[in-house]
Image: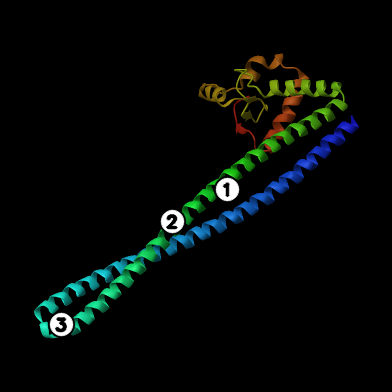
């Protein structure tokens, strides 16, 4: 029996160590999750900035195209300024090409950032699934640990002897009978009459208080049927429950 208790205690110790390990892994997983969320926030910020830049470049490209059309019209109208306008047109086209190239690069950067975000979301989802699995394992280990503890308590109770258990169970049955309402024999006692220390449930006491005489039912009807031993135990129990504030007090005529 002692060897079995030692084995159970060793198992409990190992389970506690494993629970500590799970808590540490959970903390590391939480730190990793916070890091991924920070990276996600930074990527979203970069994407927002890239989108703003893209809109700016598109607007600038539209303005340059307008300038290009204006220059083309001026070339057609002003032949004498053809050479100068052609140079300006070439420069404008070059800038437009640069802007388009830059816009294309921004678009590629945006797509790459979106891909990274999707990959981070997948990693975060996988991490959350892993955390849920670890929580499930931890819960199952705690349940097994509780079963082992109950077995230890059961073994300890068996070593103390069945006679003690039977005596305690008998006293428990007696106290349960004492705690039942003496009138309905069903609901628990909740209210005590201060003059005689008799207990009843709330519904039965309300019926008595509605009565014209307002007398204690036990004192009036079945006082002679109660044993001296049970009355003493009930009185002690009532006083304890009154001290603990577990009962309501009602004053009735004796």
Q: Is residue 192 left or right of residue 75?
A: right
Residue shown at 72% from the left, 48% from the top: 21
Residue shown at 19% from the left, 84% from the top: 84
User: Does 222 sit above or below residue 94?
Assistant: above
Nearest-to-viewer mark from 1 and 3: 3
Which residue extends farthest left? 77
Residue marked by disc 3:
82
Quadrant in which the N terminus is drawn: top right
How far apart marks 1 and 3 lie (CA) works out to 66 Å
Asked if residue 108 can be seen in this view, the reply is: yes
Q: In the figure, residue 246 lies in which quadrant?
A: top right
Q: Which mark is residue 127?
A: 1
Q: Residues within 10 Å of mark 2 (few under 14, many from 20)?
A: some
Q: Is residue 239 left or right of residue 72?
A: right
User: Which circle's residue, 3 or 2, is located before the other in the chain?
Assistant: 3
Residue marked by disc 2:
114
Q: In the figure, residue 10 lies in which quadrant?
A: top right
How far apart marks 3 and 2 lie (CA) works out to 47 Å
Residue 37: x %, y % from top left: 52, 56
User: Which circle's residue, 1 or 3, is located before the other in the chain?
Assistant: 3
Asked if residue 160 can be seen in this view, the reply is: no
User: Does 102 sit above or below residue 77?
Assistant: above
Q: Residues within 10 Å of mark 1 (few under 14, many from 20)?
A: some
Nearest-to-viewer mark from 3 and 2: 3
Q: Nearer the viewer, residue 68 or 27?
A: 68
How far apart marks 2 and 1 lie (CA) works out to 20 Å
User: Which circle's residue, 2 or 1, is located before the other in the chain?
Assistant: 2
Q: Nearer the viewer, residue 122 or 145?
A: 122
Residue 38: x %, y % from top left: 52, 60
Q: Secondary structure at mark 2?
A: helix
Q: Nearer the viewer, residue 2 or 111?
A: 111
Which residue extends farthest right? 2
């Amino acid at each position: 029996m002692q060897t079995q208790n030692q084995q159970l205690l060793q198992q409990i110790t190992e389970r506690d160590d494993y629970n500590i390990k799970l808590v540490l892994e959970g903390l590391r997983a939480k730190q990793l999750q916070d890091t991924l969320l920070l990276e996600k926030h930074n990527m979203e910020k970069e994407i927002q900035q890239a989108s703003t830049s893209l809109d700016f470049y598109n607007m600038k490209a539209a303005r340059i195209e307008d300038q290009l059309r204006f220059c083309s019209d001026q070339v057609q109208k002003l032949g004498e300024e053809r050479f100068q306008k052609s140079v300006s047109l070439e420069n404008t086209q070059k800038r437009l090409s640069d802007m388009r190239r830059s816009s294309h690069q921004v678009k590629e950067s945006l797509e790459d950032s979106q891909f990274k975000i999707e990959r981070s979301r997948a990693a975060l989802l996988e991490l959350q699934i892993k955390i849920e699995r670890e929580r499930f394992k931890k819960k199952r280990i705690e349940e097994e640990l509780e079963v082992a503890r109950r077995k230890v308590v059961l073994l300890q109770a068996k070593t103390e002897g069945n006679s003690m258990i039977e005596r305690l169970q008998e006293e428990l049955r007696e106290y349960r009978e004492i705690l039942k309402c003496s009138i309905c024999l069903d609901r628990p006692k909740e209210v005590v009459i201060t003059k005689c220390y008799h207990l009843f449930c709330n519904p039965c006491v309300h019926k008595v208080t509605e009565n014209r005489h307002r007398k204690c039912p036990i004192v009036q009807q079945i006082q002679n049927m109660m044993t001296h031993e049970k009355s003493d135990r009930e009185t002690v129990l009532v006083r304890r429950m009154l001290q603990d504030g577990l009962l309501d007090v009602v004053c009735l005529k004796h």
